[in-house]
Amino acid sequence: MDEDRDLSYHYDNAEVTLNVSLGKDFTEGNLYFGDMRQVALSEMQCWEVEHRVSEGLLHRGQQMHGALPISSGRRWNLIVWIRASQERNKLCLMCNRRPELVEGGGSTDGFTKPCIAPLNAACVTINTPS
Ligand SMILES: O=C(O)CCC(=O)C(=O)O
Ligand SMILES: [Fe+2]
């Protein structure tokens, strides 16, 4: 709390993300979006999206995005990362490999083992739009 004034460019470990602006009072701090994570950062275009308080924004989790710095106030958001096991069982978004599945009970379709690969540095590069 009180420390994160912005959020660098990244993609989410989710198929779809819901981002709801809860307020409170803040200035600046817009979201920005780029292409899907597979596009080279050097070729990516970014655009800014105004995110008004009480509005929800639904985006693909693998679309690159970030939050610009706020210049005053406090910015609260509700973030819901929505994951689909059918998709995630095919590919781990964090290491780009097919995950090993652990048997689940009942009607589950498997759970992934913890990912041991280091985070891809390209995913956490700070690259704010000009
Ligand atoms: O601060 C925001 O609105 C973005 C948050 C976000 O992208 C995340 O938590 O994955
Ligand atoms: Fe995110």
Image (cartoon, helix red, strand yellow):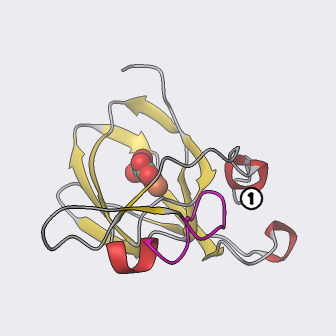
Who is closer to the viewer here, 115 or 11?
115
Q: Main secondary structure of the magenta part?
A: loop
Seen in the picture, residue 5 relative to 11 is either above or below; the reply is above
Q: Quadrant of residue 118?
A: top right
- Hey, which residue is sitting farthest top in the picture? 2
Give the magenta range: 89-99
Is 99 on the left or on the right of 82, as rendered?
right
For label 1, the residue is 130
Who is closer to the viewer here, 104 or 119?
104
**Image quadrant containing the C terminus:** bottom right
- Hey, which residue is sitting farthest left in the picture? 106
Horizontal and vertical percent position of residue 16? 36, 72
At 87% from the left and 69% from the top, the residue drawn is 42
Is 103 on the left or on the right of 49, as rendered?
left
At 68% from the left and 48% from the top, the residue drawn is 117
Which amino acid type is marked by label 1?
Answer: Ser
Label 1 Cα neighbours within 10 Å, binned few <14 / some 14-19 / many ≥20:
few
